[in-house]
Amino acid sequence: MHIHYPAPGIEHEIPVRSGVAFNLRAGETLTVIDPLGCQVSDLLAFSAADTREYISSGRTLDYASRIFLTVPDPLYSNRSNILLRITADTVRRHDFLLTPCSKDTFRIIYGDEAPHRGCFGNFVEALAPYGIEEDAIPVAFNCFMNVVVDGQTGELRVDPPLSKAGDYISFVAETDLVVGLTACSALQSNGGSFKPIRYRVQQQEGAVERAE
């Protein structure tokens, strides 16, 4: 399997409407940063030992008994194991309901005739070296995405993110992971414009860096 560990302790940038994938060791902390404000980042996590195990919106929300997650909530897998745990959060409003945007999102919702491949297409490309195929891509944890739910009708509305420049959310890995991360490609989700996302990996204290 392909292995890539981001250089620890520095901020890496994901350009607008693109995505990356990388390995995250158990005990490491991943911080997702909105450098300019009002920009969503879709996050996926798969067990490095068996990528058929992945973060599960259904199980996580079921166990949390609410749809808005923040510190110290865990993100469970489809096998009910904790893959990530939220350890810091300056925004406290994220989405774990809506699937990654795709060319079909833009075709069906926006009527685009030549749609962008969206976060889904970016995930497909970034995760392919890890042997993860497109039909295995689940609902992502959408950092900074502001989905408003009508408590009476259940109607969903996507409002601009509440994140300001420099806001962030951090997760600690509970096991070795393959992570996918994007700078979201949907105008409505990002307040009408596209901006980059940054991320930083911090090693667990006392950990020895392994070669790629």
Image: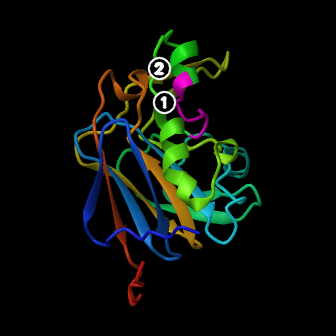
Magenta-highlighted residues: 96-103
Instruction: Give the residue drawn at x 61%, y 39%.
Output: 67
Would residue 50 be counted in the magenta stretch?
no
Whether tag 1 and tag 2 are in contact, CB under 8 A, the answer is yes
The answer to which image quadrant residue 48 occupies is: bottom right
Q: In which quadrant will I find the N terminus?
A: bottom right
| Label 2: which secondary element | loop
Cα distance between the residues tagged 1 and 2: 6 Å
Would residue 101 be counted in the magenta stretch?
yes
**Dot label at residue 117:** 1
Q: Is residue 29 above or below residue 74?
A: below
Residue placed most toward the observer, 135 or 186: 135
Q: Amino acid at mark 2?
A: Pro
Picture coordinates of residue 61, whole percent (x, y) = 67, 45
Residue picked out by circle 2: 115
In this picture, residue 80 sits left or right of residue 120: right
Main secondary structure of the magenta stretch: loop
Q: Amino acid at mark 1?
A: Arg
